[in-house]
Image (cartoon, rainbow, N blue to C red):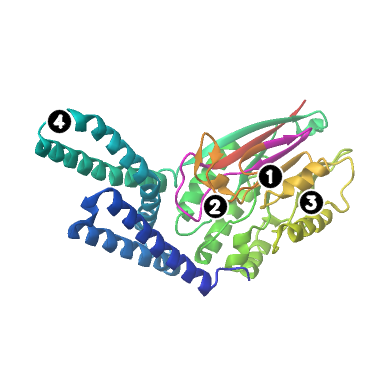
C-alpha cells in the first residue's frame, strides 16, 4: 500500500498553519490595517475553518459534502499563496504611488491622510485580487474540460490505420472534485467523437464508493467503441485499494495492460497496444531500472514490424519509448502542473516531459494535463480530453 501516513498528514497540517502565520506576519508588516482586532480575528477564524475542513473533506464520504462547499478551503489556501506572492508587489506599487506626492504636499497632515487612504485602498485590493483569482482557479479552472486534438503522421503507419481515432482520458480522480455526473459529460463527448479506441492512463477513481458506478458507465461505453477500452495503472490506484479496483475491472469489458500487450488488429503489419505499471521507486536510478524491466515485459512477443502504442501513467516511460522508436506513447500523472504561464508549468517539481506533445524523430510522446484533478485548482492549464487522429504520411 502506497498511501499517505499519519505523520505525513501531520506535516501537511503544520505546513498549513505555518503558511497562515507567515502570510499574516507579512501582511502586518506591509499594511498596518491587518493589525486591527477585527481583521486579525477574521483572518485567523477563516484560516482555522479552512485547516480543519481540509482533512474532514477527505474523510467524509463524497455524497455528504456538496462539491462546491468542499472547494471553499482551497479557495482560502490558494488565496493565501497569492497573498504571499502579490503583497510585496502591491506594497511596492503603494510606495510608488505615494513617493511623488510626498514632495508636493505642503500640509503634512493632509499628506499623511492621503497616504493612509491609498495604503488602505491597496490593502483592500490585495485580498480582492488574490481571492478573486483563487476563486476562478478553483471554481472555473478546476472544472472546465477542453477537447484537445492532435493529428499525428508516420510514413510507417499501416494504411488501415489512416484516420484511426484514439481518445485518451487520464487522471480523472473521480471523487470529491470530479463526480460521476462529470464523468457522464466526458463520456458524452467521447460518444460524439466516435473513436475507434478509448484509452485511460491511470488515476481513475479516488472515492471507492464511486468505483462501481464508474465501471458501469465505462462498461456501457466499451460496447460502443469498435476496438474497446484499455487501461493502465496509476499511482492513485495503489493509494486507494488496487485489489478492489483490479477485481472491478476484471469483471468488466475494460482491458488492463499491466506490463503486457494486446494485438488490436491482426495484419501483415499488426497493430499492438502496450501497457506498463506505475514504477514505484525510492530514487531515480532505481526507477530507471524498474521502468526498463516493465517496458521489456510489455513489448515481449510483439513482432518487430508491428505498429505500437504504449500506455503509461508515468511520463518518464517516454524515455524508454524514444530509445526504442515506439511510434506513440500516451501518459499522464503530472496534470501539466495545473498552474502555468504561457504554457510553462510553475510547479516546483519538474519533469522533462511535463505537458503536451513531444517528438523524437518518428516517435511521439504525449503528456495529458488530466481530465480531472485531486487538487481543485487550475490556472493556465485546463483539464482535457485528448483526441488523436493517426495519419499516413
Q: Which residue appears farthest toward the top when viewing the image?
A: 393
Whole-number angstrom distance, CA of label 3 to CA of label 4: 80 Å
Q: Earlier in the sequence, mark 2 or mark 3?
A: 2
Disc 1 element: strand
Disc 2 element: loop
Disc 4 element: loop
Quadrant of residue 130 within the rendered picture? top left
The circle drawn on residue 172 is 2
Which of discs 3 and 4 lies nearer the camera? The answer is: 4
Looking at the rendering, in which quadrant would you find the N terminus?
bottom right
Whole-number angstrom distance, CA of label 4 to CA of label 2: 59 Å
Q: Which residue is mark 4?
A: 105
Contact between labelled residues 2 and 4, with CB atoms less than 8 Å apart: no
Q: Which residue is mark 3?
A: 262
Which of discs 2 and 3 lies nearer the camera? The answer is: 2
Is residue 142 shown to the viewer in this render?
Answer: yes
Verify whether residue 39 appears in magenta: no
In the drawing, does residue 96 fall left or right of residue 327? left
Could you classify mark 2 by the number of other residues whose Cα lies within 10 Å: few (under 14), some (14-19), or many (20 or more)? many
The circle drawn on residue 330 is 1
Amino acid at each position: 500500500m502506497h498511501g499517505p501516513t499519519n505523520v505525513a498528514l501531520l506535516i501537511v497540517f503544520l505546513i498549513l498553519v505555518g503558511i497562515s502565520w507567515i502570510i499574516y506576519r507579512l501582511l502586518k508588516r506591509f499594511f498596518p490595517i491587518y493589525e486591527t482586532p477585527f481583521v486579525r480575528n477574521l483572518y485567523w477564524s477563516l484560516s482555522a475553518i479552512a485547516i480543519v475542513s481540509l482533512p474532514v473533506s477527505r474523510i467524509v464520504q463524497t455524497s455528504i459534502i456538496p462539491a462546491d462547499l468542499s472547494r471553499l478551503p482551497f479557495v482560502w489556501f490558494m488565496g493565501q499563496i497569492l497573498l504571499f506572492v502579490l503583497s510585496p508587489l502591491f506594497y511596492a506599487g503603494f510606495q510608488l504611488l505615494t513617493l511623488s506626492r510626498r514632495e508636493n504636499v505642503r500640509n503634512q497632515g493632509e499628506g499623511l491622510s492621503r497616504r493612509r487612504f491609498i495604503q488602505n485602498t491597496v490593502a483592500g485590493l490585495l485580498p480582492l485580487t488574490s481571492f478573486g483569482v483563487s476563486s476562478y482557479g478553483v471554481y472555473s479552472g478546476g472544472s472546465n474540460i477542453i477537447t484537445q486534438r492532435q493529428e499525428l503522421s508516420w510514413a510507417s503507419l499501416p494504411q488501415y490505420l489512416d484516420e484511426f481515432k484514439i481518445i485518451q482520458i487520464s487522471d480523472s480522480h473521480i471523487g470529491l472534485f470530479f463526480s460521476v455526473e462529470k464523468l457522464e459529460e466526458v463520456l458524452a463527448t467521447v460518444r460524439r467523437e466516435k473513436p475507434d479506441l478509448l484509452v485511460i492512463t491511470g488515476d481513475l477513481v479516488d472515492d471507492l464508493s464511486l468505483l462501481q458506478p464508474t465501471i458501469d458507465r465505462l462498461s456501457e461505453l466499451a460496447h460502443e467503441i469498435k476496438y474497446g477500452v484499455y487501461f493502465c495503472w496509476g499511482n492513485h490506484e495503489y493509494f486507494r485499494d488496487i485489489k478492489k479496483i483490479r477485481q472491478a475491472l476484471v469483471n468488466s469489458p475494460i482491458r488492463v495492460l499491466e506490463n503486457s500487450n494486446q494485438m488490436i488488429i491482426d495484419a501483415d503489419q499488426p497493430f499492438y497496444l502496450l501497457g506498463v505499471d506505475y514504477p514505484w521507486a525510492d530514487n531515480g536510478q532505481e526507477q530507471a531500472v524498474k521502468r526498463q524491466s516493465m517496458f521489456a515485459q510489455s513489448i515481449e512477443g510483439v513482432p518487430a514490424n508491428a505498429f505500437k502504442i504504449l500506455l503509461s501513467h508515468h511520463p518518464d516511460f517516454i524515455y524508454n519509448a524514444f530509445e526504442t522508436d515506439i511510434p506513440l506513447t500516451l501518459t499522464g500523472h503530472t496534470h501539466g502542473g495545473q498552474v502555468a504561464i504561457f504554457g510553462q508549468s510553475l510547479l516546483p517539481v519538474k519533469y522533462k516531459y511535463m505537458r503536451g506533445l513531444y517528438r523524437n524523430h518518428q516517435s511521439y510522446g504525449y503528456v495529458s494535463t488530466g481530465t480531472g484533478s485531486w487538487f481543485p485548482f487550475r490556472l493556465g492549464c485546463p483539464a482535457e480530453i485528448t483526441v488523436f487522429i493517426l495519419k499516413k504520411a
